[in-house]
Image (cartoon, rainbow, N blue to C red):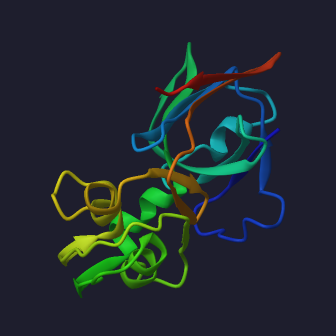
Amino acid sequence: MIQLYKKGNTDYKKNGDIVLLPTECLLDSTLNGDWIGSMSHPIDSEGRWKWITDDAVIKAPASDGTQQLYRIVNYDIDDNKGVTCDLEHIFYDSMDDCWIDDKRPTDTNGQGALDSIITNPKYTGSSDISRLSTAYYIDKNLMEALNGSDENSFISRWGGEIYFDNESVQASQNSSYYYYDFLNEDDLYYVYEQAN
């Protein structure tokens, strides 16, 4: 079941404002990569399609058994094809609301680094990485600090694999899987690929 929370409704522990019945919902959850997706919904007589707008959030079942939140971006309405939209994992919000002015986790493990760089209490983080390292983050958002191309990114300094679970991030030494979720009107498919 895919639930939609209208823009402004952030009470994700409760049921959404409406249940959607998309013809397709593709979620690509790649460790240390993109957590994005796309969705297609018919123009239905119940008017569910009217709820699909930019900045609304959907809650969809993920291949690991959790319910993951994705923000709707770039929606488009076509009278013949229905509504299509792109999706970004809710943790991507941290690009706009979790800013790091100047943090310098020094000679610390993965958990110590996360505790230092997560500056918005909306987000949490956990790590089992015991490697000690030091990094300097100045004028960065949380996503850049975690997985950016900069030599000071968490991934560059501590290594590991970044996994998002709604507004929480887990940085693990080895998770070993890429998840692709395919949802359509008839079935729910999960594909697991073992990483090398």
Q: Nearer the viewer, residue 156 or 47?
A: 156
Q: Is residue 17 left or right of residue 68?
A: right
Percent x, y for residue 37? Answer: 51, 34
- Residue located farthest toward the front when viewing the structure as drawn: 131
Identify whether 20 is placed above or below 82: below
Percent x, y for residue 194? Answer: 57, 25
Q: Residue at x 50, y 28 (%)?
A: 195
* Quadrant in which the N terminus is drawn: top right
In the picture, residue 42 is in which quadrant?
A: top right
Q: Is residue 56 left or right of residue 22?
A: left
Identify whether 28 is placed above or below 19: above
Q: Residue at x 79, y 67 (%)?
A: 13
Percent x, y for residue 143? Answer: 34, 61
Q: How many marks?
A: 0
Q: Residue at x 53, y 74 (%)?
A: 123
Identify whether 85 is placed above or below 17: above
Q: Nearer the viewer, residue 140 or 196?
A: 196
Percent x, y for residue 148? Answer: 25, 54
In the picture, residue 182 is in which quadrant?
A: top right
